[in-house]
Image: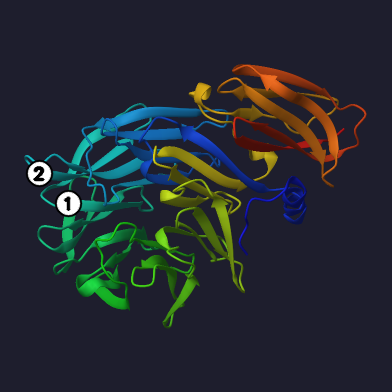
């Protein structure tokens, strides 16, 4: 189904259908600086907290954001990072301790490009390791093996080949997966239970290809003809399930469809997921514990597709102008999806996630540029709701019950910029689920609230 902008009552109905956890889609701004949301890559740690690596294109810095459980911490990992504007250039993975590892590409022109690798060692960033150097080194993809050792694939555009490297505890061991003009564009890497690499990519003659290491040599398969590999938005994304079967999401450029390829252990199955007009750009895939794929992607809006076991459930998540640019998806401990993406011409970094109100996150700093609301839950007799207005504006804050009936009007009228704390006395309200609805400055925020005594 396709979800458009619903009324509050419709939205509340969706929450009821979601089950006892009252899960919903939540949205926040992680970094509001201009041109910071490029090439984002997201991973979720064992505590179910998201980590995002991304590019600040304004000053060519590699940035890293981590949710602590209470707030976002943002820092610069490396400077002088200048990837080509059409080449996905950042990939993040977390080790068994939840520490981030990042592969990324740079373009310096002289002495040339580099594929770099940075990791957090528990106290500092180790960011000087160069995996490869030369010209035309683009599209790195990173995965960590069972020993937390990094593996990286990338495209050497100048030599016309797909490259792969693994760290053997002392050096990078580099091999060529396929050597042909155009091979390696849009590549994506994952590792199986034997720590063997599997890679999806665009090969020569504009084919979708798949390569895997069998322990002795590389096996490659041509899956589909996808069209011009250099067009903005073309991408592939691979994820392996618990049976080591590959799932690949990709854009079919000729038709602009979102497509999905899956190997069931015997043969490949290829289907079209979404064939709406110009809809399948920049897909990112993750596979849940039931071996069902989840795909984030974009047209002019951010979209999300999930295989339910019998059909594809498709949602429009963010209808903001050019929402979903260079998005990335990862699943939390309960298979709840998290998506990082850039929004609009200013390319601010956004985070969307599906979860209950108890898991809801507050809008990150700097707060002065955003409408924000925090609403603790569960509560008993009183709740303090904090609102942050970026500027003086007319504001409405109301509480609705699960039937869409207004339980309280807390703000109705003009409010100055800054922090506002509103205490709601809910001692006379019955136990249950409520929705805090805030509207100001053209923005709308909702937060779940559970009264439980």
Q: Is residue 98 visible?
A: no
Q: Is residue 123 placed above or below 192 in the rendered structure? A: above
Residue 265, quarter of picture? bottom left
Q: Quadrant of the N terminus?
A: bottom right
**Left or right of 53, for residue 450:** right
Residue under the image location 69 percent in, 48 percent down: 23
Nearer the observer, 210 or 409: 409
Mark drawn on residue 112: 2
Residue under the image location 55 percent in, 66 percent down: 292
Q: Is residue 402 placed above or below 176 in the rendered structure? A: above
Assess disc 1: are there few (<14), some (14-19) or many (≥20) residues with their C-alpha within 10 Å of its C-alpha. many
Q: Are marks 2 and 1 in contact (CB under 8 Å)?
A: yes
Q: Position of residue 400 (x, y in %)?
A: 80, 38
Q: How many marks?
A: 2
Q: Which residue is mark 1?
A: 137
Nearer the observer, 173 or 59: 59
């Amino acid at each position: 189904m396709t979800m458009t902008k619903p009324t509050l009552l419709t939205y509340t109905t969706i929450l009821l259908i979601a089950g006892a956890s009252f899960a919903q889609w939540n949205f926040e701004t992680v970094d509001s600086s201009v041109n910071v949301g490029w090439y984002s890559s997201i991973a979720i740690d064992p505590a179910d907290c998201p980590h995002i690596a991304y590019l600040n294109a304004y000053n060519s810095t590699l940035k890293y954001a981590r949710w602590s459980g209470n707030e976002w911490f943002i820092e610069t990992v490396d400077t002088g990072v200048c990837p080509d504007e059409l080449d996905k250039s950042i990939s993040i993975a977390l080790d068994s301790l939840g520490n981030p590892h990042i592969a990324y590409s740079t373009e310096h022109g002289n002495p040339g490009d580099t594929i770099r690798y940075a990791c957090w060692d528990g106290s500092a960033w180790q960011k000087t390791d160069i995996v490869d150097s030369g010209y035309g080194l683009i599209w790195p993809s990173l995965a960590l093996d069972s020993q937390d050792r990094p593996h990286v694939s990338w495209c050497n555009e100048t030599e016309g080949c797909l490259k792969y490297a693994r760290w053997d505890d002392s050096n990078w061991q580099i091999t060529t997966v396929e050597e042909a003009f155009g091979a390696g564009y849009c590549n994506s890497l994952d590792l199986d239970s034997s720590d063997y690499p599997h890679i999806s990519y665009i090969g020569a003659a504009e084919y979708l290809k798949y390569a895997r290491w069998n322990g002795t040599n590389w096996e490659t398969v041509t899956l589909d003809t996808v069209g011009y590999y250099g067009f903005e938005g073309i991408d592939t994304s691979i994820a392996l399930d618990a049976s080591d079967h590959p799932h690949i999401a990709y854009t079919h450029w000729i038709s602009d469809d979102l497509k999905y390829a899956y190997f069931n252990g015997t043969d490949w199955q290829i289907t079209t997921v979404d064939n709406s007009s110009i809809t399948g750009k920049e897909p990112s895939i993750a596979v849940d514990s039931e071996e069902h794929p989840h795909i984030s992607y974009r047209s002019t809006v951010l979209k999300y597709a999930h295989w339910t076991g019998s059909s594809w459930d498709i949602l429009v998540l963010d209808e903001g102008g050019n929402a979903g640019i260079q998005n990335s998806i990862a699943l939390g401990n309960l298979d709840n999806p998290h998506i990082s993406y850039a929004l609009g011409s200013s390319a601010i970094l956004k985070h969307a996630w599906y979860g209950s109100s108890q898991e809801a996150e507050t809008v990150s700093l700097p707060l002065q540029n955003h409408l924000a609301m925090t609403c603790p839950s569960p509560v008993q007799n009183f709740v303090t709701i904090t609102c942050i207005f970026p500027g003086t504006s007319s504001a409405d804050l109301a509480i609705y019950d699960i039937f869409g009936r207004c339980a309280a009007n807390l703000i109705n009228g003009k409010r100055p910029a800054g922090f506002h704390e509103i205490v709601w006395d809910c001692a006379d309200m019955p136990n249950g689920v409520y929705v805090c609805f805030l509207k100001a400055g053209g923005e709308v925020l909702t937060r779940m609230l559970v009264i439980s005594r």
